[in-house]
Amino acid sequence: MRPTLRQRRRPTLAAATTLLATLSVLPAATPASATPALSKAQVWLTDLSTDTHLAKQAPVTWKAGPVPDGSSGSTITVDSTRTYQPIEGFGASFTDSSAWLVGTKLDTAQRNALMRDLFSRHDGIGLSVLRQPMGASDFAVSGNYSYDDMPAGQSDPTLAHFSIDHDRSYTIPLLKQAGRINPRLTVMATPWSAPGWMKTSGSMVKGQLKPEAYQAYADYFAKFLKAYAAAGVPVRYVTPQNEPLYEPSTYPGMSMPADQAKTFVTGYLAPTLRKQGLSTRILGYDHNWDVTSHPESLYTDPAAARDVAGTAWHCYAGDVTAQSVVHNDYPNEPAFQSECSGGTWEGDEQGGFAGAMDNVINGPRNWAKSIVRWNMALDTDGGPRNNGCQGCRPVVTVAPNTDGKWTYTPTADYWGLAQASKFVQPGARRIASNTLGKGSIEDVAFTNPDGSTALVTFNSGTSARTFTVGWGNRHFTYTLAAKAAATFTWTGNQSGSTDPATIGSVDLPFRNPDGSKALISYDSSLLAQQPQVRIGDQWVGYTLPTGASLTPPTGEAPLSRDGWQATASASSSDGPPSQAIDGDPATRWSSGHGMQPGDWFQLDLGSTQTFDQVVLDTSASSGDYVRQYEVSTSDDGTTWSKPTAVGAGSTVTRILLPSTTARYIRVTNTADSGSWWSIHELSVLAPDGKAAPSPAATDHGLQRKSAALPDGTRLTAVYNSGTSPATFDLPWGGTTYSYRLPAGAAAIFTNRSA
């Protein structure tokens, strides 16, 4: 006899039969027309503090009329008339370790129960996305392997030894079973490394792809896709390389910088897939939020942009708003979250659940079409590992019980995914809603293909919160315990209008030549992600997508470094401040610790000088750029000006300033990051008085729209719907700059009170 949910703090999913039976009370598809009058919203709650797991609650009753006055500070407004990206779904990865545990350790009954609980929309939580490693990852049972391994010193350019036999025993059967249970399943595939003989390291560990192996590697992808399709597992998306900016030293990995990725995708992989009649789409990047230039580099050329279907993102560095930044820079290019593991670093089970809910809510709020956690299953030690992540948490734990029988137990990731995956159908569209923010009620809303609406909420605060949900001319009020999640579902059509100010964001739709829509959505949280310069009593901001440029009317020349001295709030033992101004790009200053707000780097120019640009070059340590900055100046090194420039950094952070005369410059980091802050070369520039080459304005294809945010920020978006770069004049601070905008890109200019 299986224990009931009430008998276990962390129930096994096999034991969750009673719960999932109650889940089936909610019809998998209820047309809006089936409900003659909207009267109640259904509620599904997870509150780990009370041992409540995705439990149906008493429905809440809608009240007629607008949200009462005085509720605005605690109101979530949902607007079904404003729609955004379609959703492919939610899921995880059957890594080799996960598939081995589920496929070989669970008996048939337990395995079937788990697969039903994971993938069934009616009897389970309806997971619909799987991201599969192509070969070994850091979670593999038998060490490193590819689909074409050769003895040391030998190669196989014709791929005569290619085989997916390793996956046939326990991985492919699980993928096929998942597809049978959920026919809307999407499969992604990603290599951690090319076969060692294709690489400069001669190994699956470290190294880059040899130039002479580019075509063989493209053929390797094609063979994999055909073999998997023949085995009954069609793959919808591939990425060229997992985490291309990281070379692990103990498990498979491969460096693939942006220029190499672009060459491989546009010159080899995409043409090969087309030539062989494969419809699988390519996603770029597949790495963290903290570097946006890598994925955007694939979009700067329209021909290359046609070869990729979007960007795959990981959650381990940077901020999720990077997805919105890249979307607004290139609004035709979709975002996918392809990996985000929870783990012991989040603390206890409630901390893990909070991390999962943050991912489930804020990923889609920032344009993600998919949310994919990492391992579907691991044992109680977080393995089997192939020298990989210590403390990574799976969706379910597979382990023997006290009787020695292997069974499975849900983790916080399971319950976090379930709050969305059970209720948000593949093909749903995210719709507009405001969020009450960190420390309060966070949310995301969707309209399903059947017309039903799902609102996913989570209380990230430390005490219970009472809030109101407004939808057209109806509203209800609900109280949610701290660290608890509730999903509300209802049918019907929205009636009544919504004040755009209650949402807090503005949408600026543009039209492409083919009639499709390019949509930019902007709110005040994005201001921190773009450069802003204080001009008089105004902050003037701008975005600069990869491939765009902003050129002043006169040339710029670097100031002489004679007499310069550099200091910093902290330094590593081998990275003193002087190395940032020594003229050697191979040396660097480093903070010696993960970035913290208040870290600063200071430059004494030796005398009072006039300048208007500061450039921080971190190219040789691309992940170590300042995350967010503010710049102040001083005449004496003691009394400092108010910040004259703020913004988000990049590999080469070019900070424009109003014309400034000062002796001292201080750049202060204002954000957290696990990466050290490094500067390889710091330059200060000033106008040289010579007229800069000014290309003639070519603004055909440009579309412009303006709007104002509720906080008074004014913005103008310029979108290039043409097929070639466009150039336009940009009046700014008493002068006129030249702005070059790639095809398919958008620039946003903001103005707010200082």
Image (spheres, helix red, strand yellow):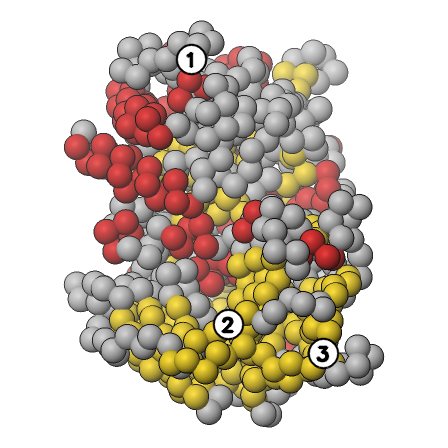
Closer to us: 281 or 27: 281
Q: Quadrant of residue 329?
A: bottom left
- Can you identify the residue that label 1 sits on? 149
**Amino acid of disc 3:** Ser
Q: Is residue 379 above or below residue 669?
A: above
The tag earlier along the polypeptide, 2 or 3, is: 2
Horizontal placement of 749 versus 620: left or right? left
Horizontal placement of 750 versus 479: left or right? left
Asked whether the viewer can see residue 107, the reply is no
**Amino acid of disc 2:** Ala
Asked whether the viewer can see residue 744, the reply is yes
- Can you identify the residue that label 3 sits on? 607
The tag earlier along the polypeptide, 1 or 3, is: 1
Extreme residue in the top direction? 151
Pointers 2 and 3 in contact (C-beta within 8 Å): no
Horizontal placement of 289 versus 165: left or right? right
Q: Position of residue 654 (x, y in %)?
A: 53, 67
- Can you identify the residue that label 2 sits on? 557
Q: Quadrant of residue 296?
A: bottom left
Q: Secondary structure at mark 2?
A: strand
Q: Secondary structure at mark 1?
A: loop
Q: CA distance from mark 1 to mark 2?
A: 53 Å
Q: Residue at x 59, y 34 (%)?
A: 395
**Amino acid of disc 1:** Asp
Q: Secondary structure at mark 3?
A: strand
Q: Position of residue 391 (x, y in %)?
A: 70, 33
Q: Is residue 16 above or below residue 106?
A: below
Horizontal placement of 148 versus 403: left or right? left
The tag earlier along the polypeptide, 1 or 2, is: 1
Q: Quadrant of residue 284?
A: top left
Q: Residue at x 80, y 46 (%)?
A: 573
Q: Position of residue 575 (x, y in %)?
A: 73, 49
